Amino acid sequence: MLVAMDAADAPSDASRFEALRNRLRQLYHGRTPAALRFQLITTVIDLSIIAFFILTPLLRHKSGFLWIDYSVAVIMIAEIAARLLASTNMLRLLRQPTMLLDLFILLTLLAPQWLENFGFLRILRLWSLSHKGIVWAQFRETRFREWENVVRALSNIATFLFVVTGFVYTFFFQQEGGLESYVQALYFTVATVTTTGFGDVTLPGVAGKLTSIVVMIVGITLFVRLAQALFRPNKVLFPCPECALQRHEPDAVYCKACGHKLKIPDDED
C-alpha cells in the first residue's frame, strides 16, 4: 500500500515541478501584464545590483559590507536558478557567455576575501544585462525604440568605463583608498578613453603605460561604433516573412534582400 502511495505521489511532484517551470517561462518570456511587471521588477533589481557593484570599491571596508555582499549573492542564486528552470535547454544556457559571466560574478560574491582583486569584473553584469532579450523587448515597446542601437552602444561604453575604472583603482590607487582615489581613477579612465588626457593623472611604470594604450585603443573603437549608431539612417525593426531580414527603411514597400512585399505598420497604427 505504501508503494502504491509513493507511486501516486511521484507524478504529482513531477507535475508540480513542471508547472513551476512553465510559470517561470511565462514570466520571463511572456507579454502578459503579470509577465511585464515581473520583467520590470527583475530589471530594476539588476540595475540596483549593478549600482552596488560600481560603489563596491568605496564600500568594501565599511561595516556591514559583507552582509550586503552575501545578500546580493542570494538574490543572484535565486535569479540564476529561475533562469535555468525557465530554460528549455539548461546545458545550452549554462554554456552561454552571459551565464558563465554571472556564475563568475557569483563566485566573487561568495568569496570576496579571496577574489577581492577581481571584484571590478562584477560590473560586467551591466554587459550581461544589456544582452538580455527581455530588456530590449521592453525597450521596443516604448517610443524610443529607434534609438536601440545607440542605447546599446552607450551601455557598452558605460560598462567599459566602469570596468577600467575598477581595474585602475584596484591596481594603482587602492592603497590610497577613499572617494578621491576612485574619482582619480574615473578621471584617468574618461580622459584616456576620449584620448584627451591632460597628463595630470598618469599610471606609473610599464604596466601603467600598457594599460593606457589598451584603454585608448578600445575606447576609440567603442566611440566609432557609437558614431555609427548615431549617424546610421533610422530603420524600423520588422522581420520579413520571406527571408527574416529585420531592419528596413520606415517607408519600405518591398524587402531589399528578397523583394517580398512588406506591410510595415505606421507608428499611429
Image (spheres, rainbow, N blue to C red):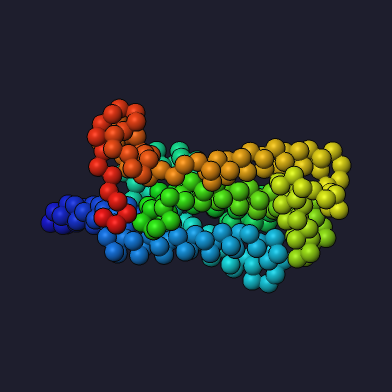
- Image location of residue 218, percent across then percent down: 66, 39
Nearer-the-camera pick, 167 or 235: 235
The quadrant where residue 182 appears: bottom right
Residue 67 lies, with reference to residue 216, above or below; the image says: below
Query: For the view shown, which residue lies furthest in the bottom direction?
Result: 63
Q: Nearer the viewer, residue 260 or 135?
A: 260
Q: Quadrant of the N terminus?
A: bottom left
Determine if residue 81 is in view: no
Q: Position of residue 269 (x, y in %)?
A: 26, 55
Q: Is residue 227 above or below residue 201?
A: above
Residue 48 relative to residue 142: left or right: right
Q: Residue at x 47, y 64 (%)?
A: 44
Q: Is residue 201 above or below residue 258?
A: below
Judged from this view, the residue extending furthest toward the top is 258
Q: Is residue 90 left or right of residue 202?
A: left
- Residue at 56%, 59% in the rendered image: 50
Q: Is 76 placed above or below 240 here?
A: below
Tag count: 0
* Residue visible at 43% across and 56% down in the picture: 144
Q: Residue 61 location, x and y as percent?
A: 72, 66
Given residues 164 and 225, the one toward you in this image is: 225
Residue 257 visible in this rendered orientation of the protein = yes
For the point 29% across and 57% down, the residue is 268
